[in-house]
């Protein structure tokens, strides 16, 4: 489930709309949540959480490149956000960019930042399996 990651929210109205979007997202009402996140971004294009959570919706919709693009926009605003880094790693993994996924998750851990999913496993294919993208070796980030 998505979680709020920081509090750059300014007005009570913005906080209420973000809470509404997050609630809709957690209920699986992705179309409605996406609309409210979009509304927040029209009011504040640098709303990192809304960008990142739109990326999560894209990921959940199997739009992995779109997810990566949105999460990268959020990371441009909050480059050391552990949740954003973790979701970027997941998007890279879904795109078959295993080495990049390991690198970004390693960065997250090297910064001393963890998420509740710290022990998540990144599946990295060995050289003979890269063509088929079938995982044959699992690596757990430190």
Image: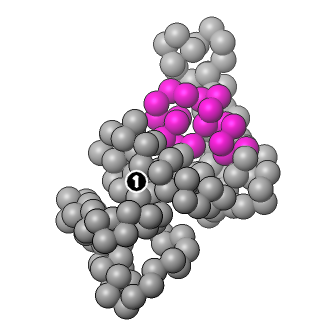
Compare residues 8 and 64 and report the one nearer the observer: 8
Residue named by callout 1: 56
Compare residues 40 and 124 and report the one nearer the observer: 40
Query: Is residue 95 covered in magenta?
Result: yes
Q: Position of residue 30 (x, y in %)?
A: 25, 59
Which residue is painted at 58% across and 61% down in the image? Answer: 78
Give the left or right position of residue 6, taking residue 24 as reference.
right
Circle 1 Cα neighbour tier, 10 Å, few/some/many (<14 / 14–19 / ≥20) = many
* Stretch in magenta: 89-106
Which residue is painted at 54% across and 70% down in the image? Answer: 5
Compare residues 46 and 24 and report the one nearer the observer: 46
Main SS of the magenta part reads helix
The image shows residue 15, relative to residue 135, as above or below, that is below
Query: Is residue 98 covered in magenta?
Result: yes
Which residue is painted at 51% across and 19% down in the image? Answer: 133
Q: Position of residue 102 (x, y in %)?
A: 67, 36
């Amino acid at each position: 489930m998505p979680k709020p990651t920081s509090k750059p929210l300014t007005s009570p109205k913005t906080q209420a709309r973000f809470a509404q979007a997050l609630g809709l997202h957690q209920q699986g009402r992705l179309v409605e949540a996406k609309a409210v996140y979009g509304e927040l971004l029209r009011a504040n294009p640098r709303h990192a959480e809304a960008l990142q959570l739109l990326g999560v919706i894209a990921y959940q919709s199997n739009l992995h490149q779109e997810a990566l693009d949105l999460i990268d926009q959020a990371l441009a605003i909050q480059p050391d956000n552990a949740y954003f880094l973790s979701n970027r790693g997941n998007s890279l993994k879904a795109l078959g960019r295993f080495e990049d996924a390991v690198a970004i998750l390693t960065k997250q851990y090297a910064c001393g930042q963890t998420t509740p999913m710290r022990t998540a496993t990144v599946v990295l294919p060995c050289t003979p399996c890269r063509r088929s993208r079938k995982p044959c070796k699992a690596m757990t980030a430190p």
